[in-house]
Amino acid sequence: MRHTVVYAQRGMFAGWPANNGVWSWDGREILVGFTVGALEEQPGHNILEPYRSLLARSMDQGETWTLVEPDHFVGATSEAAALADQIDFRAPGLALRVEGTGYHGSDDPAGALWVSEDRGEHWRGPYALGPWPEVAGMEITSRTDYVVEGSHACLLMMSARKGAFLTDRVFCVRSTDGGRSFAFVGWVVPPSEPFRAVMPSTARAADGALVTALRRREIGTQRCWIDAYASRDGGRTWAFAGKVADTGAGNGNPPALARLADGRLCCAYGERDTCRMLARYSRDGGASWSAALVLRDDFQRDRFGDADMGYPRLVQRADGRMIVIYYWATRERPEQHIAATIWEP
């Protein structure tokens, strides 16, 4: 395993790539989002408001990184409007960013979409996504997870909650008119299901099925894990495929899922009890998973003992190696920063 630093600054806390997104257009240029705020060691997150949503770009497959600070991006106070022109979802420089409420960096309970046509250098938005009767009265808590299906067709993986923290459930919506409207498609995990389901990470398996990995938690306990669900009808119905892994107490950790060039699925995640970054592979569309591969195990807890780490995003590079991007702290660099690990799958 080889580790690199994506973003680090003394006196600042940087975290949560999974809340922000990753984009790669050719496996060489990679763009990742994260949240930054002033650092103060305290119980829970060592970050003070106000937060800023920033980006980092690599032109060499994640070996070196430069900071990108868009002047109009998630967290701006603009009110969401209808999208007038169609998005070409297969445009070579396209990046989409979804925002919601209830996580760091944005606060839009109705949800909204941001669009970049120049690989994240400039963004326009926010654009309205709903509403949908199926989630009436619920807050949108979506992060960025989407599957491009055509020039004017795209599936967004969403989540919503009925007010209370940890009550999120996952659903999907689809646009077939270039983003001017999104129709409700189906629940992955409906509100009637007893466990929290949030932060999907989705890939198309080798046989064409949609597979999504979900962050799970049993309400009222510290039991947290990752499940895989699959759909063979374009997202209308979903079925449990298999359990990926346990993710430890302290609210667990979200998954990062990617399909490899050889057809396997790879899921990377943080395990909070042991403070490790791990990965597992599946050859059968998420039904079964390999033993855990340890990506990194040198996390340094703060004086309060918090395991504030992980939240990865995952990309396969042009040379076939994997790169996972997450937030981390070490003895030498004790403030939370954005790091990456590169390995041969």
Image (cartoon, rainbow, N blue to C red):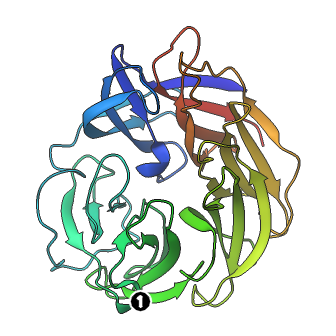
Task: Name the residue type under label 1.
Answer: Glu
Q: Are there few (<14), some (14-19), or many (20+) residues within 10 Å of tag 1?
A: few
* Whether residue 208 is visible: no
Q: Viewer-proximal residue, 124 or 39?
A: 39
Name the foreground residue: 300 vs 3.
300
Q: Can you tell which quarter of the image residue 226 is in? A: bottom right
Helix, strand or loop under label 1: helix
Q: Residue at x 78, y 74 (%)?
A: 241
Seen from the viewer's position, the closer of residues 92 and 172 is 172
- Write the residue at 63% across / 31% down: 341
* Number of dots carrying numbers: 1
Residue at the spot of label 1 = 134
Residue drawn where x is 85% and y is 63% of the image: 283
Residue 220 shown left or right of residue 22 in the figure: right
Q: Is residue 65 left or right of residue 195?
A: left
Q: In the rendering, at what x and y percent does residue 102 appear?
A: 36, 56
